[in-house]
Image (cartoon, rainbow, N blue to C red):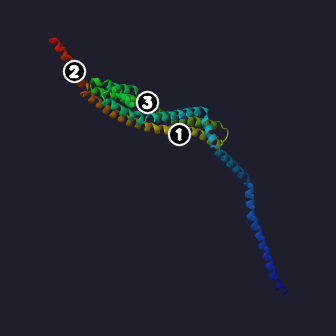
Amino acid sequence: MGVCTASPGLALGRWLLSFALVAFASTAILTTPAVAYAQEGEQPVEEKKEGEEGKTRLSANPIVHFFVSIGVVFGIIFAALSVGTLALIIILVMDLRMGEAVSPAFVDEFTGLVNKRQFKQAYEMCKNDNSFLGRVLTAGMGRLQYGIEDAREAMSSMVETVKASKDSMISYLANVGTLGPMLGLVGTVSGMVGAFRRLGAAQKAPDASELAGEISHALVVTLVGVAVAVPAIFFYSYFKNRLTAIANNTANLADDLLTQMYHNSKKAGPAPTTTAAATAATAPERTQTAVQEKK
């Protein structure tokens, strides 16, 4: 009885002891790799933090990276191209305006002088006006004495001359649009050459971050070249189309005004009326002279 009574308690104690040992062993097994992993991974975690801090510092100063990548030489070149392109765009915007090429006030004043048959005053007004329409009309009126067709040819030649002079200014935008990417490519190739020279001079495996930095510096120059070229190409196409429209409108309006002047010059003027009035005014004097001669 005593043995039988003690056996279940002893078995229960052994079972609890075994459970405790298994639980302790399991806990030790489960926790020990975690601690060891944390100790072994302590250095990579620090390196990772340092890398993240470096990336943060790099991303926090993109402007510094930008200017350092361009350098002094390319910085001066791209600054000059940018300022020159902006100035040229402003000049062309002010010059290539329909109101500047064909002034409504000029058209009204010229039409009034022609209708009054004041052709010399109309010619002087066109000669003193430096607008697109004024220069074209001056060329046509100078040849009007040789016929309307000759005058139209002179106006057509002047339209092409003025258009060519303005087109030469617009072509500088095309030059900037071509030179920008080319200069950027020169900077990229130069940076890549420097990166590969460092790669070849390295005695051991080079640091990938250093090579990536060199390549990043080189590509920034290409980015700046493309950024300068894109607006230049856009405004080149815009001003080309605008100049064509202004030239066509100016040529058509100049032809209408010159034709009006030509037909007004062919109409009978007030000169015969003046002659008749002078004849009528001198008729009594001639009659009185004739009477005195008879006496």
* Label ID, residue 279: 2
Q: CA distance from mark 1 to mark 3?
A: 23 Å
Query: Which residue carries the number 3 mark?
Result: 168
Quadrant in which the C terminus is drawn: top left
Side of 263 relative to 48 (left or right): left
> Looking at the picture, which amino acid does disc 3 mark?
Ser
Q: Quadrant of residue 111?
A: top left
Side of 281 relative to 129 (left or right): left
The residue under the point 81% across, 77% down is 13
Which numbered disc, 1 or 3, marks the residue that appears first in the sequence?
Answer: 3
- Confirm or deny contact between disc 3 and disc 2 (CB under 8 A): no
Q: Quadrant of residue 1?
A: bottom right
- Foreground disc of the pair 3, 2: 2
Q: Considering depth in this image, is 236 or 6 the residue closer to the camera?
A: 236
Crowd around label 2: few <14 · some 14–19 · many ≥20 (10 Å): few
The residue under the point 33% across, 32% down is 112
Q: Position of residue 133 (x, y in %)?
A: 37, 31
Query: Helix, strand or loop at disc 1?
Result: helix
- 289, above or below 108, in the image: above
Query: Which residue carries the number 1 mark?
Result: 227
- Foreground disc of the pair 1, 2: 2
> Looking at the picture, which amino acid does disc 1 mark?
Ala
- Foreground disc of the pair 1, 3: 3
Q: CA distance from mark 3 to mark 2?
A: 61 Å
Q: Position of residue 73 (x, y in %)?
A: 59, 31
State the residue lying farthest toward the left. Answer: 294
